[in-house]
Amino acid sequence: MSRSRQPPLVTGISPNEGIPWTKVTIRGENLGTGPADLIVQIQGLLNLRNLGNCCNGMSKLFLWFLSCKRGPSWLLYVFAHLGLTICGHNCLLTAEWMSASKIVCRVGQAKNDRGDIIVTTKSGGRGTSTVSFKLLKPEKIGILDQSAVWVDEMNYYDMRTDKNKGIPPLSLRPANPLGIEIEKGKFPQKDLEMLFPGMSADFTSENFSAAWYLIENHSNTSFEQLKMAITHLKRQANKKSEGSLAYVKGGLSTFFEAQDALSAIHQKLEADGTEKVEGSMTQKLENVLNRASNTADTLFQEVLGRKDKADSTRNALNVLQRFKFLFNLPLNIERNIQKGDYDVVINDYEKAKSLFGKTEVQVFKKYYAEVETRIEALRELLLEKLLETPSTLHDQKRYIRYLSDLHAPGDPAWQCIGAQHRWILQLMHGCREGCVRDLKAWRCKTPHRVAFVEKLTKLVLSQLPNFWKLWISYVNGSLFSETAEKSGHIERSKNVRQRQNDFKKMIQEVMQCLVKLVRGALLPLGAAEGGGRQLGGWEGKAELSGQWLAHVIQTLRLTYESLAALEIPNDLLQTIQDLILDLRVRCVVVTLQRTAEDIKRLAEKEDWVVDSEGLTSLPCRFERCVVLSLQSLRGVLECKPGEASVFQHPKTQEEVCQLSINIMQVFIYCLEQLSTKPDADVDTAHLSVDVSSPDLFGSIHEDFSLTSEQRLLIVLSNCCYLERHTFLNIAEHFEKHNFQGIEKITQVSMASLKDLDQRLFESYIELKADPIVGSLEPGIYAGYFDWRDCLPPTGVRNYLKEALVNIIAVHAEVFTVSKDLVPRVLSRVVEAVSEELSRLMQCVSSFSRNGALQARLEICTLRDTVAAHLTLESRSSFKQALEALPQLSSGADRKLLEELLSRVKSGMHLQLACFQAAPPPAVKT
């Protein structure tokens, strides 16, 4: 025979070892073109006794061979030898050809423990193998294991009776049930019997003691090994729990052997020809089957005789069945109504109406009238369910469609819309009453009125969308079935045109109720417009803060957006927009009022700690407070789509402008209060200074307490900073948030600030300049000094030195707080001193030569010393004072004057260094 393919080659098997009847997967090359390709002709004589072990379907094939009446030589040519062997055993019986590279089969009962896997095909012939399979011995059958084979009895030695006994295999005890090594202990048997009376270490005994068994056999076993024993027992139990399937798998070979035996018996009977012998077993069986067939024919003849009668009866019943529908329809309607199968009821009613609606038969009329009675009751039931609240939109549409299909009188859909409208209003008023009732017991962090608005808006958003969708469905006719749509389209169109205004009023009423309830809770001052009892109940409660009002505004904005998304006309939602605008205005007003209250308390936080520029933290705190307040209003002032500006009304602009001015004036008043605060109320232990200039402040003791003059200076310094920076920055923030009247706010605030600054400055000058001015005249005439009779001058007198020291002290005090205030303060002090000195000189009636020289020396010394702080007024005063003196007549006097001036300046150069001109201070940005 010619072959067109290469011989099979086995390159892998998985698994590569196992017990008999293990399922394996064979992989390789050229493993055949199909299941039939695994069989080829053999060379050698085939023994008929082993025919059942050679091929699949052996019984039928064997009978076919016998019927051919051919000899053994023909059998040698036709039969195939094994197409798949593993370890020399035929596996073709269980082989399942998957592809040319894969075959699945089970390993048979081979004699060899290792062997090749040989595949033989028609197209390729006998193949080869590069791998081998190892056959493992099956496990021993335990005493509780199921077995499909017969196990011979065996003897064992009973230690208790000292006799040999033969017992069946199922009674054999396993040598080691725990699966771990047994280590016999040294405990005496008698001690164990006394310790466990009436018990036994034999696990087949009814009185088995596990503790006794463990002491006797595993006294030295570790705990880890005992845990492994538990796993072994569980595994054994799982094997037994597999049931009959595992039993069949384990005895698969036995079943095949039984089948082979039956085939052999059949072959033997045919070969001996005993089936044709009279009285044989097969002949008797044939006779019994023939008699049974005859008896069956006799029985069915009677049945076939009754067939015609049954057919006629069946036809009559079919005719009656048509009318049975009507007779049973009232009862079926009741049952289906109880089950809620309204669609079935409607279909049955339509069918009965089409069949019996115009009948003239009295019986049919009677039953049809009963059906109409049931249908009328169903209409009332559906209408009642439709008008029940609460209900879902799906249920409402379903009941309306049912009523439309049942041709219910009136307009159930419009009745449902009216019921839902009344239900929504009832829920809204019930929400207000419930919240007012729980007002006294409210303990949550969220204010009760804010919680009420959230609950009310949530209620509206949960009910109004379905209400609006119900109306839309009513308008476009989707509430009704196709039949009702065709029959009542014109009539509904008329109803819709008439009822559009009614539905618009319903929506307006809901919106107005929402707005009135919210106004009553949040805007009690304007609640008079909506009625007393409906909006009352919130009296005596503190007004909400701007933060909570902003939260409520956000809630109402979301509510408006959700309602607008339903495509509700804007004119129906305008009342909500008006409410939001009023709340926005109220939020701005309340926030500005609360800001003014917070600023009033800033004076309590003044620590009088001065930085290098003479400022405390108070101006920064004031600016931060105002800025944070304005930032909290950002979302409120921002206009959402469709919203108007908060400042659109002149009245609102004026109110907000006045509140803004009030904020600035409140802070100015705080500064004034701080400047006049008694010493006992000053809560500070020392004056903080600029660490970058310790030489200027090293003399200040850490226990130094503020004086009234120092407080005035600090407040003056803060006022200067407010005028130059803070008020301008706040004006920019007002402008950024679109506040109106910013020029007025700035102008009024600046005027008030300058007024306070001037008053504080005059107070400080009065405190510092008056003592110096008052000491001049007594100092000049101390010791009965007389300008007409005095000694030649040798230097300036002590009164001038004292005045200069006092001016230096003022300079030091001002410089300690603020360098920028030094020129302003010293200029005014110098003006007062020069004016007083000019007056005193003009009051002298006459001067001697020495007196004129002394006076000119003192006036020039004071003028030259404070030259850096001279003003037009002070220069004029010094000029007038010098003009009141006689002119120097000789050059010697002028020379003496110059020498004395030089001597005075050189002697007091350290004290006079503070009067030197300093560079202009840098402007703080």
Image (cartoon, grey):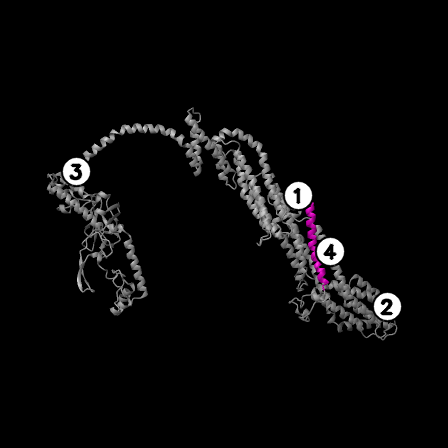
Left or right, residue 139 beside residue 732: left
Q: Which residues are magenta?
A: 648-677
- Alpha carbon of mark 2 to alpha carbon of mark 4: how far? 45 Å
Q: What kind of secondary structure does the magenta stretch mostly adopt?
A: helix
Image point (53%, 44%), residue name: 462
- Report x, y in % for residue 758: 75, 59
Q: Nearer the viewer, mark 2 or mark 4?
A: 4
Does residue 227 lie above or below 702 as drawn? above
Mark 3 lies on a secondary structure that is helix
User: First in sequence: mark 3 or mark 4?
Assistant: 3
Above-or-below relation of 793 to 445: below
Q: Is residue 330 among the parts visible in the rendering?
A: yes
**How far from the left and from the top, in percent, is residue 453?**
59, 47
Front residue of this view, candidates 546 and 443: 443
Q: Which residue is mark 4?
A: 752
Give residue 58's position: percent from left, percent from top: 18, 43
Sequence-wise first label, 2 or 1 = 1
The kind of residue on which mark 1 rests is Glu
Query: Nearer the observer, disc 3 or disc 4?
Result: 3
Tell me which amino acid carries mark 2. Answer: Leu
Front position among marks 4 and 1 = 1
Residue neighbourhood size for the residue with mark 1, other residues' Cα within 10 Å, grouped as few (<14), some (14–19), many (≥20): few
Mark 4 belongs to which amino acid? Ser
Image mark for residue 885: 2
Sort mark 3 into few (<14), some (14-19) or many (20+) by Cα contacts within 10 Å.
few
CA distance for labels 3 and 4: 134 Å
Classify 203 as above or below 459: below
Tag 2 near tag 1, CB within 8 Å: no
Where is mark 3, residue-wise? 288
Instruction: Give the label, 1 or 3, closer to the camera.
Output: 3
Q: Which residue is mark 1?
A: 529
